[in-house]
Image (tube, helix red, strand yellow):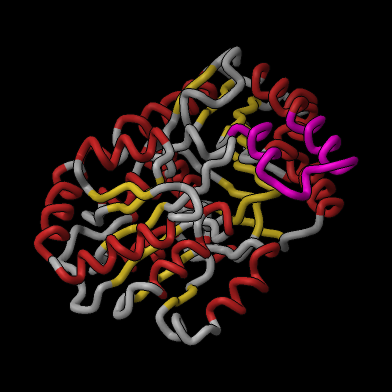
Amino acid sequence: MSILTSGHDVADARLHREVAALHRRGLRVEVLGLGDGAGGPDGATVRTWARRGPAGRGLLAAVLPWRARGRILMTLDPDSAVTAWPAARARRRRLIVDVHEDYAALLRDRAWARGPTGRIAAALVRGFELVARRADLAVLADDHLPPAAARHRLVLRNLADPAMLPEPSAPDPVPRALYIGDVRATRGVFAMVDAVAAAPGWILDVVGPVAPRDAAALTERLAAADVAGRVRLHGRQPPARAWRLARGAWVGLCLLADTPAFREAVPSKLGEYLAAGVPVICTDLPRQAAVVLEHDAGAVVPADEGCAAATAELLRGLQADPAELDRWRAAARSVADRERAGSAYDAFAIAVAALLDQR
């Protein structure tokens, strides 16, 4: 089986979980994607390319399906899905399309998706949804994602994989917050930094790639005296390495902005924080807030200009009253088993194996 991506790094956490499930089913996997091959999934054959601009990415997407050796092609992004469709049909390969997000909604979040560029991107998304409807299998990260009318549809939520997570542990002596994921303004990076600035004594570990659009402003913000040395950027890391930082973390942060792409999202990090026994502070987007409030495993803050101040108040309160932290941590541990992956990824691997049997 070949997994193709012209837009994702081979250190992507969902990719690692999928490959691990396929290996448990006895399937051989190759991954063709971006970044450092050393960060790719264990046991897979990994081939990588450097990240490129829009034109280079399009060319890479066109080439990858013809370089793949697998009897099944699985794509992780819209452009590689569109280019894989004709290659799969010409070479009599099965095609699986992994749908991570509502891409039409995501375009409304992106400042670059305007004018001619936006129209091209919207046309690509329409082509992608057509391919996803006709693919041999559409694997969706959530049940609200399009296409609803896919011929063969499997919901594979971004549940935690215990093999990539540390066991719950005692909190560090020094209070520490953790964020793992894409690092950009709409995902709350500046709110996190401002919150830690207003909570003296706290440290913030940030793991993930910084969006180029926000890199200069983030560098400038981290040089300010109120956070100097207290916010540590770790860059992109393979999942198992990234989640080592959950050991001893007091809270995990999930401060998504209220945008069309995020409003109905349940980020994978939410379940992963809980599965590692780490309470969560999240914004009041309906579905992610419901998870935290249902289990009383953290707190919810407003997804508006008051986000940083409300988060800082919570951080200061936890430092002053560790009993509240103990209660949250106990609640997080109590839902760990529920949030950890099991049959969902096994069902995915079974569906893939069934496609091989149909040849």
Q: Position of residue 64 (x, y in %)?
A: 74, 45
**Tag count:** 0
173 part of magenta stretch: no
Report the quarter where the N terminus lies.
top right
Farthest right residue in view: 116
Report the side of 125 relative to 31 (left or right): right
Residue at 16% of width from left, 70% of height from top? 320
Q: Residue 6's spot in the image, x, y percent?
A: 71, 48
Instruction: Provide residue 359's location: percent of width, then percent of height.
Output: 59, 19
Q: Is residue 120 magenta?
A: yes
Question: What range is drawn magenta here?
Answer: 102-125
In the rendered image, residue 169, in percent from the top left (x then y), is placed at 17, 64
The residue that appears at 36% across and 64% down in the rendered structure is 178
Indicate the quadrant where residue 120 lies: top right
Q: Is residue 193 visible?
A: yes
Chief secondary structure of the magenta span?
Answer: helix
Determine the image quadrant of residue 73: top right
Picture residue at 72% right of the left edge, 63% below the top: 50
Query: Who is closer to the viewer here, 89 or 39?
Result: 39
Q: Is residue 172 left or right of residue 120?
A: left
Residue drawn at (62%, 51%), measured in percent from left and top?
8
Question: Is 339 above or below relative to 216?
Answer: above
- When asked about the image quadrant of residue 201, the answer is bottom left
Q: Is residue 159 above or below residue 94?
A: below
Q: Nearer the viewer, residue 314 or 157?
A: 314
62 vs 239, nearest the viewer: 239
